[in-house]
Amino acid sequence: TSCGCTAVLISDRSIPPGKTGKIEVKFDSRGYGGQVAKVVYVQSNDPKEPQRSLEVRADIDVPPSPKIEIDPYNYDAGLMVEGDEILANLKIMNKGELELRVEFNHRSAAYEVGGKPAPAPLKIAAGKEAAVAIRIPTQNRTGAVREYVLVKSNDPMRSTLSLYISGYIITKEQLKEL
């Protein structure tokens, strides 16, 4: 098959000349929408045609649902001085037809929308977006910073996204040397 979403069952491994067999194709349509075509390759000992391609087509109706998009997926906080908090601004967009509900997961981050603590879950209407300020404390840390904030939602296709946050923290003494 042309992908892991397609499974094939054959009625017999050996079919005598002049006889027929059946090929059953199962397609897992999760994650697909609209017109889809997949290819099944049939190999045989037929000297004239040792391989044959069968195309399976489907028109998949996708029920209305929320659809999450975030910007950015990676945030570089740059150079910071010890004690400063990381401030990452995240835009969350709902490109779907139903309300999007979003929650965040990080061990020490705080989340704000419009200068106020973000509700849990954060609700975003269809076709709308929200700007989220993510604040991560950096006390007693120096050197490279690598953090992941999990963005969990009710989007059936992308229920968990990761925002990667990076930067570098220097001491106040190191700052004086710059």
Image (tube, helix red, strand yellow):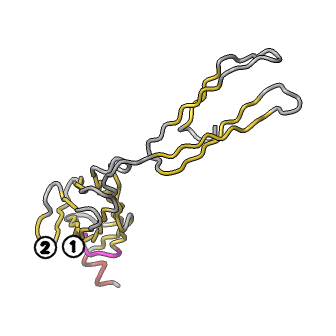
Q: Please give the name of the residue rendered at 29% of the width and 66% of the height, measured from the top-left corner.
A: 127
Whether 64 is drawn above or below 75: the answer is above
Q: Is residue 48 left or right of residue 104?
A: right
Magenta segment boundaries in residue numbering: 78-86
Q: Quadrant of the C terminus?
A: bottom left
Residue for point 64% across, 26% down: 23
- Using the image, determine if residue 114 lies above or below residue 63: below
* Magenta run includes residue 165: no
The residue labelled by disc 2 is 115
Q: Give yes or no for contact between labels 2 and 1 (Cβ–Cβ under 8 Å).
A: no
In this view, the residue in front, 18 or 172, is 18
Residue 100: % across, % down: 25, 56
The residue most toward the left is: 116
Does the magenta-highlighted stretch encompass residue 83?
yes
- Which of the pair 144/153 is nearer the observer? 153
Residue 177 horizontal side relative to residue 82, left or right: right
Give the residue at mark 1.
84
In front of the other: 145 or 91 = 91
First of labels 2, 1 by sequence position:
1
Question: Whole-percent x and y of residue 168?
Answer: 34, 70
Q: Give how far across and how far down residue 76 sits, in percent.
A: 37, 71
Q: Quadrant of residue 43?
A: top right
Quadrant in which the N terminus appears: top right
Residue 59 image offset from top left, x and y in percent:
51, 46
Residues 70 and 169: in front is 70
Measured in 3D between alpha carbons, the distance from the residue under mark 2 to the one under mark 1, in whole angstroms, is: 18 Å
Disc nearest the viewer among 2 and 1: 2
Q: Residue at x 39, y 65 (%)?
A: 74
Q: Is residue 13 left or right of residue 83?
A: right
